[in-house]
Image: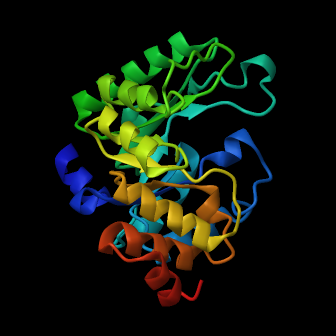
Amino acid sequence: MGKQDIMHEILPNGKGVWVPIDHGVTDFPCEGLEDIENTINSLIAGEVNVIVAHKGVVDKFSHLCQGTKTKMIAHLSASTRHGGKNHSNKVLVGDVDEAIMRGAVGVSCQVNIGSKKEAAMLERMGHITTEAYLNDVPVLGMVYVRGENVNIMKHDSTNGYAHAARIAFELGCDAAKTVWTGDKDSFSKICRAAPIPLLVAGGPSTGNSEEILTMVKESIEAGGSGVCMGRQIFAHQNVSAISKAIGMIVHDNATVKEAMEKYSL
């Protein structure tokens, strides 16, 4: 299966519900990921399009996705909370060939712009997108504005995230994760910055279903292509229900009220 066919599966009609569960490398224990097999089964039951996980998780559990609407993408970047001054330096812990052999349909990698190690991370992302291009495999870019050297341009209402999305696009990523800026006007500027699908993150878990769904709805209305949302989903009290409710908004253009009523949230 080539990249375009994979993209149609993981972003049907250009929209997707993607859930990163790679947090256990950075921090553990992590609420919602203690029993990772149960969480994966709940996400599959919630019909999410993609689960983003580290290669060991993909290798162990990608078979659970067979015959379902869910695929797995291998995250190739890592650091831990114990890294001290280097904790924001995301190093590569795998490659494209290995990820595919382990059961992934695509890969993702992270860059923290403004970090002292920004240059090395940009080089790593370029390496991964080259390798993925040669293997006809899609890449998710996670480009965050994080670090002591962040230099936001005047009047940039996106706080650097339009630039971050542009970096992901120009370095060859096929989709990118971004952040909700708090309003549709500024978020739309991020969406206009890169002609690839942009998927909104969720941030720390709040458990407030209406707030989560409202953000998703507004991001779609502003030009977003769905979500790449971890803790707000996998740490939710009802993982399958919140997944399906988000999917109803992303794929079926439902209102927040309709989605909440449908799944009793």
> In this figure, what is the number of numbered marks?
0
Residue occupying image coordinates x 66% and y 21%: 147
Towards the viewer: 37 or 70: 70
Q: Is residue 208 left or right of residue 222?
A: right
Looking at the rendering, which quadrant does residue 188 occupy?
top left
Depth order, front residue of 135/126: 126
From this viewpoint, is residue 2 visible? no
Colour scheme used in the picture? rainbow
Q: Nearer the viewer, residue 147 or 110?
A: 147
Give the left or right position of residue 91, taking residue 192 as reference.
Answer: right
- Coordinates of residue 153 in the picture (x, y in percent): 50, 18
Residue 221: x percent and y percent? 35, 59
Residue plotted at (31% across, 31% down)? 132
Vertical arrangement, residue 163 with respect to residue 6, above or below: above
The quadrant in which the C terminus is found is bottom right
Image: 20 above or below 247: above
Image position, residue 134 (x, y; %): 23, 28
Which residue is painted at 51% across and 19% down in the image? 154
